[in-house]
Amino acid sequence: MTNIPDPSNHLARALKQLATVTKVISFYPSQHPAVVSSLEKAAVFLKEALTDHETLSISVAEAAFLIDGAVLMEEDLVLAGFASYLSRRDISAVIFQSPVEQESLKGFLEVIALDPGTLRARGGPAKSLSERRLGGVSVSEFDTAAAMRMARTSVTGAGSEDPGASASSWCDRLARFLTGQVDAPPGGQHLIRRVAGDSKAAWDLMESLQKLTASAGPERAARLSAALRRIGEEVASAEPESLPDLAKNLAWALMALDPRGRIDVLGSSIPIPGADLDLAGAIRASIPEEKLGELIVSMVQSEGSLNARLGSVIRKVLIDRGVTDEQKTGVLEAIRTARKLDKPPGDVWESVEDLMKESQDDWISREYKGLLEMVGTGPTPLEEGLRNELMSLPGFVEALTPEGIRRSAWLLFGDLVAIDQEPARQWVALDQIEKRAGDLTPDWFAGCGVVAVTIRGLLASQPAPPSHVREAALKALRAIPAALVRSYRRSFHHLSPDHQSALAGAFEALEEHGIDSLLNGLAEEADWEIRKPFLGLLAARKKTAVPALLRRLADPSWYLVRNILLVLGDIADPSTIPAIAGALKHAEPRVRRDAAAALGKIGGPRAFALLKECLDDAEVCEVVMRSLASIDRRRTVGTFLDMTERVDLFGRGAKRLKEAILTLGSLGGNESVPRLKAILLRGLWLPPSAGDGLRIAAARALERIGTTTALGAVQQGTRLWRGPVRAVCAEIVGQRASTGAAQAPH
């Protein structure tokens, strides 16, 4: 070809101005001044170009304009770009007929400003222009049929370089070009782009690729990937906006391949340079829903087993396709229908069904897990001399022995939880923390707190982690305290103060997550010396521990319930009073006593009222009275004074009255002296001996109060007519006198 030499010719200027207007009209509305002025200039240039021509036909090549077969200014990049722009819209020629009105020119540019996919959907550029009834401008479209005929001719003609010259269609020729076996057929770029806009063309091409590669053996996957990559590169360079349509058409046409070919394509990676796209992934994401079950079933039937390769392909499809639970139901139905066939065996289908139920993170976790599980394996054996030298180095034994490696690996997984943002890998790290916690020894105690804080931070993060990650985190937080308790019980008699301190720090970091394990330790451990620290660790959790403690109050182990009541008393949370009240009726007296003691520590009107109701329980009465006094001494004194207000003439109810009298003595205070004195000096009981026990109790109570007024009442008791009472009073007065004399200065 020869170039038109004149760089200033009117046609070149007109086409370059049209290229400029095309850009302007894509950014501004048609009435914008920039559009109007640019159009006016283009119309002037085009009128000048048509001065000597009534009709001017300009052919459009891949990257150039041709006039009568000659390239128009071959080196001009603006013209080359505009020619490519028109070529991507399947325009093979533009025809201008004088006169070209400015409105017609604007209409033409508005049509070609549409993206290729939209233009094809509207029937192509020629149809779109004809519908506008524009005068002076028309186009010819690329003749796909002619290109197909030329492709067939070039294949079947004599001297063809193609050894498989039996092909008889354009798609066969194109398939051979795409796999690198022949040169591009005439109009090859247009034929490739047609695949992005025509699903039937995509199917035909895939059929040709099937025939061409079916016997390629191990090279088949590479050939298919190369062919699809060439298609993707062409569309990306010419019509990047059509890449989604290309992926959709290729996904639909995938069924034209045999099942093994589908596995080759779906299991591959086909990056398209400059498009930031993996075409294979886009194809997987575009598989029609109605074909999903058929596709998976066909691949399983072809392989006959769920091997690693097929499992990986199916997972990739499920992940990239974003298969919903509803869609999975449809696929599972297709699988269950296929199970009725003899091949493959039923257990294979069961494995496929299990795989269908996996999540994306489950799959990634499994892939990642193999690598992570390598961490923490035993060290490679060392030559003895080197080993002895290393053993002498500070920290070697702790860090590089099997025990040290296991601890370091465990801590590493805690670090991974903190720094990795991928849910799947977080899940794996948490899973490893849970499983490796079984190796925990006292030397791990200090690290447990750090790991626990990391996991709790993940649970508190925003946005919240996925449900399966959260579940793995909670399982890890349950495993750590359980291992701590086991290790503590096993090593109790060999623990150092540092270990004890580290254990307390670990449970502080675990917060509520360590409470159940401590309670289980209390229930399982028979040695009180070991159990006792658990009580302190639980009490240190304060109100955080209350829900778990209350849940175990109904435990059949009465000694566990006793321990829980001790902790609840130390925590002293008033909200626990109703639950503790139930333990006041426990069958075991020791439980009832500890419940009363707990209420005494908690205090308050409700606890006081509950304790008063227990005064009739002889086995807990003493604890109840102390608890009442610890809650409200003044009110307790009043309660027992009320109990002593009525003294039965015949000594009935003497036991309870006697306990009340003694309690008043224990409580002390002059406010009780008048009542106790009245009982001591009371003259009439029937029979007279019925009152001796109560009089003596009153004397002992007055003795305990010990004030001058109280002892004065006892002095009066030494003159009572009842001998036993008089003797006790004399004893008290005599002891007091001798004690006072002994304490007096000589």
Image (cartoon, rainbow, N blue to C red):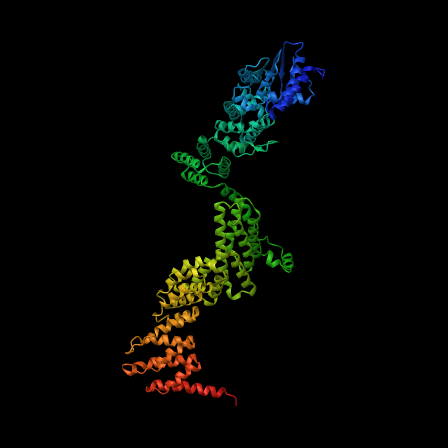
Residue 649 in the image, given as x and y percentages of width and height = 28, 78
The quarter of the displayed image where residue 640 is located: bottom left
**Is residue 376 positioned above or below 495 on the image?**
above
Confirm whether residue 687 shows in the render: yes
**Is residue 589 positioned above or below 432 on the image?**
below
At 35% from the left edge and 76% from the top edge, which residue is drawn?
658
For this rendering, which residue is in front, 150 or 40? 40
Confirm whether residue 162 shows in the render: no
Residue 381 in the image, given as x and y percentages of width and height = 59, 54
At 42% from the left edge and 81% from the top edge, which residue is drawn?
709
**Is residue 365 positioned above or below 555 on the image?**
above
Q: Residue furthest bottom?
A: 746
Give the side of residue 677 with respect to residue 652, left or right.
Answer: right
The quarter of the displayed image where residue 647 is located: bottom left
For this rendering, which residue is in front, 116 or 556? 116
For this rendering, which residue is in front, 654 or 268? 654
Residue 232 in the image, given as x and y percentages of width and height = 57, 28
